[in-house]
Image: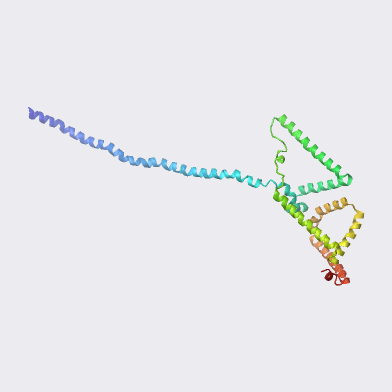
Amino acid sequence: MKPGALDAIREECAPSQPGLAEQGPFLRFPSAAPQAGPELPPGDGAPAPEEEPAGPQKPAEAAASSKETPAPSGSPGPRGPGFAPPLLFFNKQKAIDLLYWRDIKQTGIVFGSFLLLLFSLTQFSVVSVVAYLALAVLSATISFRIYKSVLQAVQKTDEGHPFKAYLELEITLSQEQIQKYTDCLQFYVNNTLKELRRLFLVQDLVDSLKFAVLMWLLTYVGALFNGLTLLLMAVVSMFTLPVVYVKHQAQVDQYLGLVRTHINAIVAKIQAKIPGAKRHAE
């Protein structure tokens, strides 16, 4: 019985071994699954490249922010020299543009203002003209201020002061600018005094005679015109002669050449009648 029982046990165990053999690969598959696991890093690496651009984006954003932060500090740079507006009238190029009527509207306003001021001075005293001008300006600004305030109250808006831009405008002169114009004024005053001393003390006889003739002609001019009339004529000439010269430059140069020739001939005759005058002056 025992040998038969052993055979039966062997027969029962025989089919179970193939099942175990079949389970072997199945049991190995989970072990192979970890081998497929290395394929996940590429999958994990796919998001990694997505995070890599995020890495460069941060420096780019930092660079952009760094570029934006200096912008506010750099923007006031050009506005820093707020003292430029009061110096516009001292600008040589701006004066040339006004005299040559390159901006007709601006030149017309300046020219008309000068004419109105000079005509007013011919009719009234300086004190009256200054007082009337101040009253006119105050009337215009106060009326406009009240109008804007009423308009803001009706529309329920808060636009602020109508002259806020002008109130915040920097109109002060720096110490360097004051020193610059003081030195320039001192230079011209000193040169004028030296030239007058040279003319009145007859350092050069010919130049002193020219100056005497000029003063003699001015006596006739003063008898015909007063100072305001001469100033008015000078202003009109300043705003008209440059334009006329540009339009008729060839003809004007021709006539000026003839006048210069006659003047040189007269000066040569004077120097011939007074021989050695210039040498004696030296």
Along the line of sight, the residue nearer the viewer: 51 or 83: 83
Residue 57 lies left or right of residue 262; in this view the side is left
Q: Residue furthest top?
A: 1
Residue 109 in the image, given as x and y percentages of width and height = 79, 46
Q: Is residue 246 visible?
A: no
Question: On the image, which quarter does residue 260 sit in?
Answer: bottom right
Q: How many marks?
A: 0
In the image, residue 226 sits, relative to residue 213, either above or below, namely above
Residue 32 shown left or right of residue 220 in the figure: left
Above or below residue 179? Residue 137 is: above
Q: Position of residue 264 (x, y in %)?
A: 84, 67
Q: Which quarter of the rendered picture does the N terminus lie within?
A: top left
What residue is at 41 percent from the left and 42 percent from the top?
48
- Which quarter of the rendered picture does the C terminus lie within? bottom right
Coordinates of residue 236 in the picture (x, y in percent): 83, 52
Q: Is residue 59 visible?
A: yes
Residue at 84% over, 70% down? 280
Residue at 76% from the left image edge and 51% from the top image edge: 98
Q: For residue 272, what is the image quadrant?
A: bottom right
Task: Work out whether residue 115 or residue 155 is closer to the camera in this orientation and state it.
Answer: 115
